[in-house]
Amino acid sequence: MTVRADLNISLDGFATTADGTPENPMGEDWGQLTAAYAATRTFRERVFGDTSGQGTTGVDEKYAAAYFEGIGAEIMGAGMFGLHLHGDDPDWRGWWGGEPPFRVPVFVLTNAPREDIAFDNGTTFHFITATPQEALERAREAADGQDVRIGGGATVVRDFLKAGLVDRLHVAIAPILLGQGIRLWDDLRHFEEGYAVSTETAESGTVHVVFSRV
């Protein structure tokens, strides 16, 4: 069982954007940050429900497909689920519509627990108040021997990295500068020690960097 994390970040290390509006909560920068990933065949099928087979099939697709392989449970923060905007809405079921792409148990870290939300495709959101170690223990049990993914956002991934709980980190570095948002690398000086590092550049210009625990 491996604990994995995957994030899209900018050249200056930002994994979130700061130009959102009530009409466009993700902001225009988010589209640029995730453009290469969103163009892949895997993303179009798993997130958009597009079964036409369209989408890129190069290096970005290789990492997009690997993102979903072998995952038995996921951990995410309240913001990734949307509770920072919809915490007062008891009917909020996340950003992903009736078929979230996870298809596994998802543990949402929050200080305001809610009732579980289950979907027919195997996704169940469990809302828990827990430390990274406690959340990981619950996710490990639910994963039943498969990998656990720390899905995000950046602050949650950083907390798990600081606690030494991540075995494999993949960052897809988009060739853009954001200048604002939440930086993944803050307070992670010398994080790379103890990891083997590999890089691969995609046709899109995205640089995929993988840190694998030695």
Image (cartoon, rainbow, N blue to C red):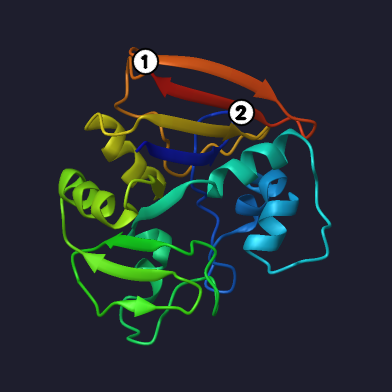
Q: Quadrant of the C terminus?
A: top left
**What residue is disc 1 on?**
214
Which residue is at a point 38% across and 78% down the rendered structure image?
Answer: 118
**What amino acid does circle 2 point to?**
His
**What residue is disc 2 on?**
208
Kindly give the residue lying farthest to the bottom in the view shown.
Answer: 91
Residues 63 and 2: in front is: 2
Q: Residues within 10 Å of mark 1 (few under 14, many from 20)?
A: few
Question: Which tag is nearer the camera, tag 1 or tag 2?
Answer: 1
- Give the answer, above or below, for where 51 lies relative to 35: below
Label whose residue precedes the other's in the sequence (1 or 2): 2
**Local secondary structure at mark 2:** strand
- Give the answer, above or below, for where 186 lies relative to 96: above
Marks 1 and 2, how far apart at CA: 19 Å
**What amino acid does circle 1 point to?**
Val
Q: Residues within 10 Å of mark 2 (few under 14, many from 20)?
A: many
- Classify residue 146 as left or right of residue 43: left
Which residue is at a point 25% across and 29% down the rendered structure image?
Answer: 164
Kindly give the residue lying farthest to the front in the view shown.
Answer: 145
Residues 168 and 155: in front is: 168
- Classify residue 178 as left or right of residue 79: right
- Classify residue 105 as left or right of residue 171: left
- Classify residue 86 as left or right of residue 34: left
**Local secondary structure at mark 1:** loop
Residues 22 and 35: in front is: 35
Residue 145 screen position, x and y as percent: 33, 46
Residue 3 screen position, x and y as percent: 35, 38
Residue 58 screen position, x and y as percent: 78, 36
Residue 208 screen position, x and y as percent: 61, 28
- Give the answer, above or below, for where 203 lies relative to 39: above
Q: Quadrant of the N terminus?
A: top left
